[in-house]
Image: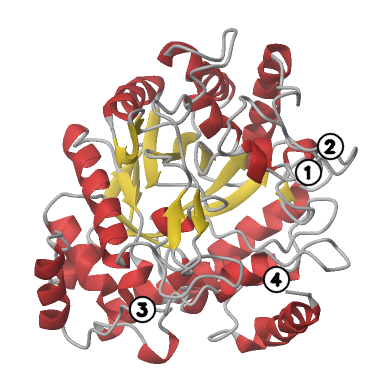
Amino acid sequence: MARFFKYKTVPDLLEENARLGIDIRLCDQLEYLEDGARVGGRLVGNRWCVHPMEGCDGEPDGRPGELTYRRYNRFGAGGAKLIWGEACAVNEEGRANPRQIVLNEATKDCFAKLVHDCREHHRRACGRDDDFLFGLQLTHSGRYSYRRPIIAIHDPLLDPRTFVDKTTGRKVDESYPLITDDELSRLVDDYVKAARLAREVGFDFVDVKQCHRYLLNELLGARQRPGKYGGSLENRTRLAREIFQAIRAAEPDLILATRMNVFDGIPFRKATSGDGEADVFASPVVNGWGMAPENPLAVDLAEPILWIAEMERLGVSLINVTLGNPYAQPHFGRPFEYPPPDGYESPEHPLIGVDRHFRVTATLQRHFPALPFVGTGYSYLQEFLPQAGAANLRDSRVSFVGIGRASLAQPDVPLQVKNHGRLDRRRVCRTFSYCTAIMRAKDHPLGQFPTGCPPFDKEAYGDIWKDVQQLTTRTPK
């Protein structure tokens, strides 16, 4: 069990950077983080973005729960001028868990309260909110829908890892039915309805989610799917294109955004050593996005660049870059120090994973200098997160610094940096994967434990973590 993060000073980290041959840059001029930027014609007051951090704490009918309100009040008061609201299912069958939020006519008043309260907390902490953007991520969970996997393509690497159909007990194999083209086409209306309501309750933008191997991301790589939504790049991007066009027609003033995988990769498994190792695969890998078919462990940005160019023409004005599949190879998406209890040890130095995030985002930002990109991968850097963000902004490698797990541990990261020039060391996320461990615990009366940061938010999650630990203790190994 190698432990990687032993850096006490900037020179320590830069020395490791050189040893590994990577390009993580650091800068002490933290004022770069306070510069304004424009998104879709709107001014955003600083360069901090809170990533879509799903709390799995909604009510069974899709309303935000008490902890949902609490989380966004804390984010609003934390000083970030761009808050990327969490995954919100566009229909009931597309929920990833039974506590995922759903925006519809029955729940819209609760969402209006969520937006109002978050803005109010931001005004109190920051003095103004006219330079504050709050958006909502619209999702369909596809093969990770919790009741019944809804798959767009058969994948010999992912199908055996996909959840069993809870309605029938059926496993996902080569005979499991694909979602039809007609069913996919009908989803456009669901996205439009959700986007209209998002605008009505006060959100500034909507994210049409295309990441982490949920439905729209799976379609991006569906080279072997027959029909109008598979095969060619034009077909594989068709459903997302139809959704963007329909939302733009229905709500022309609503800012369009997307959080998108630019690299899927292939699943990893735990080796006998405990380290992660890539699943055995046959070349070329037939499905997947942003990866070389002959070497699916290598990033290939050719198709993502073509699709981003088209999305820009469609009016998408904000892109959040991410990698990998948290169900299959979490070290790509969120480099960690400690894996969750059911996970594997990192098969690479986590700084290599951070550097991968920074490099691909920098490449895209260079290709599209007028299009704002949000970067990912910062939480692993702990106390050095602000310096890395400032350096990437200075060098035009990114437009916004996204904070994910770090925002659960310390939701006021932006204000801490602005007021003190550093993070509060007592609340720095150490990437110990407690939040992931709770998220994966399902033995709860509502079918899902709410997730947060037990080490640094004991008030809300201390007792929850104790309950999860007891379950783990009772579970036979």
Residue at x 77%, y 82% (from the top left corner): 467
In the rendering, which numbered label is found on residue 170?
2
Of labels 1 and 3, earlier in sequence is 3
Q: Assign a secondary structure to mark 2.
A: loop
Report whether residue 372 is seen: yes
Badge 2 density bin: few <14, some 14–19, many ≥20, Cα 10 Å:
few
Nearest the viewer among 126 and 79 is 79
Foreground label between 4 and 3: 3
Q: Furthest-front residue in view?
A: 272
What label does residue 2 carry, if any? 3
Q: Judging from the image, what secondary structure is the residue with disc 1 in?
A: loop
Q: Are marks 1 and 2 in contact (CB under 8 Å)?
A: yes
| Marks 1, 3: nearer the viewer | 3
Residue at label 4? 67
Q: Measure the alpha-carbon separation of dots 4 and 3.
A: 35 Å
Please tell me the numbered disc located at residue 78.
none
Indicate which label's residue lies in the foreground, 4 or 1: 1
| x and y, in percent, of residue 359 in the image | 21, 49
- What is the basis of the colouring in this image? secondary structure
Please report whichever mark, 4 or 1, sits nearer to the chain's N-terminal start. Answer: 4
Say the numbered circle drawn on residue 164: 1
Q: Earlier in the sequence, mark 3 or mark 2?
A: 3
- Tell me the kind of residue under disc 4: Leu
Quadrant location, the N terminus: bottom left
Is there CB contact under 8 Å for labels 3 and 2? no
Query: Image check: 470 left or right of 192?
Result: right
